[in-house]
């Protein structure tokens, strides 16, 4: 900064040129107070310290995110009701056994028992994501380093992931045990309705906070859907779209994403949690 | 004109570019050290610690930086806050009942001994005696050459407040220099 610039500052701040003239010697003397100038070596040393800190931070950041995500999932493993795991396992096992002994002479992939059971079993598991015995006190929930929304995502991923693994194992077993069953066509027949029904159950439990309502709506919809498909001669009061049709699968996925997003948006809010536990 | 602005370097640091970090340090090390040295009343060791802590703090918060927010006021804001925190903690640790003023060591460091002449020492001592808020704006304006807008962003106060602190600070500085003579 040269003297002219500084004195123009001084004229502005002093209010009058007379006052600026009186302050000028003071400011000039202040300038004589020289600050130490770091050497190039000192600057390089500081830059090195910061470079190391930056690299350590980057490593820690990625590691911590993975560790935190894993810790949240593990914590929810203990929180989700134990009956859900057992019930899902029994239902999927029974579905596999029944399908194994089922005559497929007149059936297609979408009418085998396994395809009927898998979506509703997953939806029932998701319907029990919430509950007084599942959720801790609000204060504890909000004091966690992760948001309620992250907890929900972890819980949803855990339950849906468990059902998905059971479904894949059942499908793999059937495709090995029965020559008339192919793995991928069977999986694609149940996967999109399962995603749709599970996300519908998720939204309903978030909105109503009542597992019974969530299960009843999903079961009703799935029953109507299957009745209209398995018994086309039965005349229902209204037409139900075929959720297992190949053409409907992209729409099932889109709906699943939208319903889950809506549920997460609604369920992640603090206000929702206050209302839920009030 | 610099090849990259401070703000562009900040974006590079966000992406993990260590060269941009080095460039930013080289650009601001001397001025930050000078600022903190004067703010701490001539304590070079403390100023060096605070400079390092300032850059570390910036690094820790770099993900929250939003381009094109000016970086320089942010850097100085961190430095000012660190200096304030240091003196607050120092005051908290004190067991005696000395007045709540900056306790500075300008009379004991080799650098301050280099300040030649009685008059200069009187001005520096008068600056030291000013309230911290006024001392900060005077140093930022007249010794660090920050604009009123930059000081306003650094201290997160309106420009009018910066002007009034400057005016009051200069007035007091003049009076104290006169009183010490």
Image (cartoon, rainbow, N blue to C red):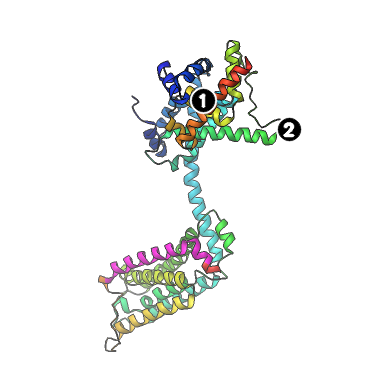
Chain of the residue under label 1:
B
- The residue under the point 67% across, 34% down is B91
In the figure, is residue A15 to the left or right of A110? right
Discs 1 and 2 lie in a common subunit: yes
Q: CA separation, marks 1 and 2?
A: 28 Å
Hey, which residue is sitting farthest right in the picture? B96
Q: Which mark is residue A181?
A: none
As helix, strand or loop, the secondary structure at mark 1 comes to helix
Hey, which residue is sitting farthest left in the picture? A247
Residue A79 x %, y %: 55, 65
Q: Which mark is residue B139?
A: 1
Residue A140 part of the magenta segment: no
- Give above or below for A66 relative to B102: below
In the figure, is residue A46 to the left or right of A201? right
As helix, strand or loop, the secondary structure at mark 2 comes to loop
Q: Tag 2: Cα neighbours inside 10 Å, few (<14), some, or many (≥20)? A: few
Can you tell which quarter of the image residue B3 is in?
top left
Magenta extent: A248-274
Q: Which residue is mark 2?
A: B97
């Amino acid at each position: 900064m040269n003297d002219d610039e500084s004195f123009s500052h001084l004229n502005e701040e002093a209010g009058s040129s007379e006052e600026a003239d009186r302050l000028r010697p003071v400011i000039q003397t202040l300038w004589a107070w020289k600050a130490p100038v770091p050497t190039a070596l000192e600057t390089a040393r500081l830059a090195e310290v910061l470079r190391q800190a930056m690299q350590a931070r980057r490593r820690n950041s990625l590691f911590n995110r993975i560790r935190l995500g894993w810790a949240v999932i593990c914590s929810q493993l203990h929180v989700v009701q134990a009956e859900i795991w057992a019930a899902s396992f029994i239902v999927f096992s029974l579905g596999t056994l029944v399908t194994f002994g089922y005559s497929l002479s007149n059936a297609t992939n979408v009418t085998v028992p396994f395809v009927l059971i898998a979506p509703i079993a997953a939806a029932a598991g998701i319907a029990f994501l919430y509950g007084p015995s599942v959720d801790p006190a609000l204060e504890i929930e909000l004091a966690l380093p992760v948001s309620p929304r992250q907890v929900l995502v972890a819980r949803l991923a855990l339950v849906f992931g468990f059902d998905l693994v059971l479904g894949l194992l059942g499908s793999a077993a059937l495709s090995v045990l029965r020559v008339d069953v192919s793995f991928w066509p069977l999986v694609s027949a149940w996967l999109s309705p399962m995603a749709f029904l599970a996300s519908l159950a998720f939204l309903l439990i978030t909105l109503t906070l009542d597992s019974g309502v969530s299960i009843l709506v999903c079961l009703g919809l799935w029953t109507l859907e299957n009745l209209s498909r398995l018994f086309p001669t039965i005349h229902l009061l209204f037409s139900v779209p075929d959720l297992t049709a190949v053409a409907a699968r992209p729409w099932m996925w889109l709906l699943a994403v939208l319903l889950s997003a809506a549920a997460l948006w609604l369920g992640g809010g603090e206000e929702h949690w206050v209302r839920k536990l009030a | 004109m610099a090849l990259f602005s401070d703000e562009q370097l900040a974006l590079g640091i966000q992406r993990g570019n260590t060269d941009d970090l080095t460039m930013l340090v080289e650009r601001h090390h001397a001025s930050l050290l000078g600022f903190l040295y004067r703010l701490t009343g001539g304590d070079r060791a403390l100023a060096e610690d605070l400079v390092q802590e300032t850059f570390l703090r910036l690094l820790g918060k770099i993900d929250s930086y939003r381009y094109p927010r000016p970086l320089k006021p942010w850097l100085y804001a961190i430095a000012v806050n660190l200096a304030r925190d240091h003196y607050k903690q120092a005051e908290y640790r004190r067991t005696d009942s000395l007045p709540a003023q900056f306790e500075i060591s300008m009379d004991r460091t080799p650098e301050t001994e280099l300040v030649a002449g009685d008059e200069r020492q009187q001005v520096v001592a008068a600056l030291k005696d000013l309230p911290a808020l006024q001392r900060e704006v005077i140093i930022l304006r007249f010794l660090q050459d920050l604009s009123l807008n930059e000081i306003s962003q650094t201290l997160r106060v309106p420009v009018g407040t910066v002007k009034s602190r400057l005016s009051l600070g200069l007035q007091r500085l003049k009076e104290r220099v006169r009183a010490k003579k």
